[in-house]
């Protein structure tokens, strides 16, 4: 990965900033130090060499909503596009959309029983298990105990032969399309129906009587129909299950129990 170029539009004609070269973190994972640019949506071009001796190529499929690291699974720009609001958005619109995203994301976290943003945990001077030395990108290669989802984010060798390892611990909602869609669409819908909200349209009127005495409103698609908002039930497969051991009654002493204990 030799360079990253940020543009202000999908035509990629006006260069805003650039970065590079990238630092290799894991196989197929590289890290750029992003330039300091105003918040917004950027279209990127990444230049890289696919293999040794090959000609450099450019990937123009990358799109970034900056800044990153806000603890959100979607962006104000994504919600604005869902609302049909043209980009770039104003600082006031951004603040309103961030609030709507946090509310929708809180509903998802409460339903799933777990946060939807993983935490970065660093462990220093770790020694990988002897039989896993060649698979350091696998979390099971390291002495790191947790009852949550975990994956290796990066590892760095030390002079002592050990490693400093960065783990991502927890459910990664931003990498889950269903979670991203739920938060994006529900944040957009809440702003659409909020008086004075970003892209607010209110309820759609289907008909008004001649005297203006009655008004009929359009009804949205019901759950399961095309165009309907996703429901929390659509995320049930990622709901955290809590297991509690059952208290069994004490076994009666032999020979009154139904089976003999081991060693009898």
Image (cartoon, grey):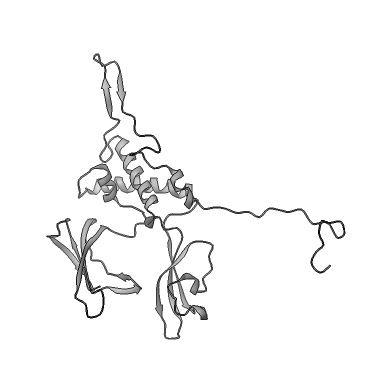
Name above or below for residue 67 compared with residue 98.
Answer: below
Q: Nearer the viewer, residue 250 or 115?
A: 250
Name above or below for residue 191 compared with residue 206.
Answer: below
Residue beneath the point at 25% across and 13% down: 211
User: In which quadrant is the C terminus drawn?
Assistant: bottom right
Name above or below for residue 174 compared with residue 84.
Answer: below
Query: x and y percent of residue 66 in the render?
Result: 27, 58
Asked where in the image residue 136 lies, by quadrant, the reply is bottom left
Q: Nearer the viewer, residue 148 or 227?
A: 227
Query: x and y percent of residue 86 in the render?
Result: 20, 46
Query: Which residue reaches farthest left?
Result: 13
Q: Nearer the viewer, residue 110 or 180?
A: 180
Tally the numbered discs.
0
Query: x and y percent of residue 168 in the render?
Result: 43, 65
User: In which quadrant is the N terminus drawn?
Assistant: bottom left
Name above or below for residue 77 compared with residue 16.
Answer: above
Query: x and y percent of residue 87 in the render?
Result: 20, 49
Q: Nearer the viewer, residue 219 or 211?
A: 219
Asked where in the image residue 68 lies, by quadrant, the reply is bottom left
Query: Which residue reaches farthest top?
Result: 211
Horizontal relation, residue 134 to residue 198: left or right:
right
């Amino acid at each position: 990965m030799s360079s990253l170029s940020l543009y202000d539009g999908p035509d990629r004609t006006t260069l805003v900033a650039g970065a590079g070269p990238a630092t290799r973190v894991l196989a197929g994972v590289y890290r750029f130090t992003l330039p300091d640019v105003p918040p917004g949506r950027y279209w990127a071009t990444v230049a890289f060499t696919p293999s040794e001796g090959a000609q450099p190529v450019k990937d123009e499929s990358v799109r970034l909503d900056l800044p990153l690291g806000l603890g959100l699974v979607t962006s104000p720009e994504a919600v604005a596009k869902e609302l049909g609001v043209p980009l770039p958005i104003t600082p006031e619109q951004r603040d309103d959309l961030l609030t709507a995203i946090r509310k929708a994301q809180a509903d998802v976290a409460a339903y799933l029983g777990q946060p939807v943003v993983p935490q970065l945990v660093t462990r220093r001077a770790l020694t990988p298990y002897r039989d896993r030395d060649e698979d350091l990108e696998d979390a099971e290669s390291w002495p790191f105990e947790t009852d949550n989802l975990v994956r290796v984010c990066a590892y760095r060798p030390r002079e002592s032969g050990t490693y400093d390892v960065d783990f991502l611990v927890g459910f990664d909602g931003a990498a889950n399309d269903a979670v991203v869609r739920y938060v994006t669409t529900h944040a957009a819908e809440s702003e659409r129906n909020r008086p004075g909200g970003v892209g607010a349209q209110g309820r759609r009127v289907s008909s008004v009587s001649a005297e203006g005495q009655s008004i009929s409103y359009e009804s949205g698609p019901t759950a399961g129909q095309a165009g309907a908002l996703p429901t929390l039930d659509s995320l049930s497969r990622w709901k955290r299950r809590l297991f509690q051991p059952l208290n069994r009654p004490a076994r009666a002493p032999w020979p009154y129990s139904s089976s003999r204990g081991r060693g009898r």
